[in-house]
Image: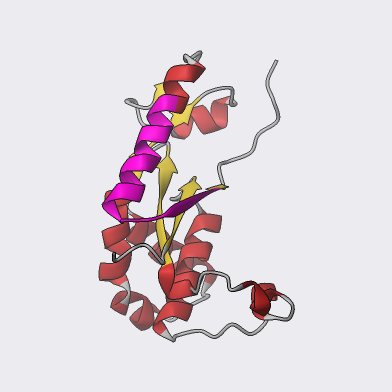
Amino acid sequence: MLGKNKLGVWIIGIYGEVASATILGSQAIAAGYSNTTGLLTETDPFKELNLTPFPDLVFGGHDIYQGNLYKSIRDYVRENRVFDLEHLASLQGRIEDMDRSVRLGTVSRCGDVVASMADPQVTRGKVNMEETVVRIAQDMKAFQELNDLERVVVVNLSSAEPETG
């Protein structure tokens, strides 16, 4: 019954900077290192919606390369100087646990820049979309079961490029 009150957040592009900021922010608030000042969801009338509290968010997702979530967040913090590195170090174990819920994504209908970032074993090119959707659904279902989650939401933070011919 551990996860039944928790919400799964499946992020497409989980090793990117926006995802790093999102996960860092939620974990910092959950650990008491940051407050909720300025968050729209903490104001009326949102407070009345009984949204999932930050400590009850569970993260997983897809990316097109094998990475390390803690390293991605640490690099983001160092580059942007947005968080105390000692506090981040205390969150390391919690963040590293999230890596078990990260899977390789798919590269399809994207430009050369995004395609060049993908690991060689990533499915790419003209793929069978039905097979791709089934694989993604299986990854999300495994995440849901691993964390005993009742619900999972998908947040698409993948790189955006203009559509190519």
- At 59% across and 82% down in the image, what residue appears? 36
Above-or-below relation of 54 to 119: below
Residue 78 among magenta residues: no
| Numbered disc total | 0
Front-lying residue, 72 or 5: 5
- Point out the image quarter for the N terminus: bottom left
Front-lying residue, 66 or 147: 147
- At 70% across and 30% down in the image, what residue appears? 162
Residue 136 among magenta residues: yes
- Point out the image quarter for the C terminus: top right
- At 58% across and 22% down in the image, what residue appears? 109
Left or right of 22: which side holds 145?
left
Residue 128 in view, yes or no: yes
Q: Which residue lies furthest to the right in this view?
A: 45
Q: Where is residue 101 in the image (x, y as percent from the top left)?
A: 32, 49
- At 36% across and 31% down in the image, what residue appears? 119
Q: In which quarter of the image is residue 46?
A: bottom right
Q: Position of residue 146 (x, y in %)?
A: 27, 51
Magenta residue span: 134-154
Q: Where is residue 121 in the image (x, y as percent from the top left)?
A: 32, 25
Residue 124 in view, yes or no: no
Above-or-below relation of 100 to 136: below
Q: Where is residue 152 in the image (x, y as percent from the top left)?
A: 46, 51
Above-or-below relation of 84 to 80: below
Q: In which quarter of the image is residue 135?
A: top left
Which is the main secondary structure of the residues drawn in magenta?
A: helix
* Snapshot colouring: secondary structure
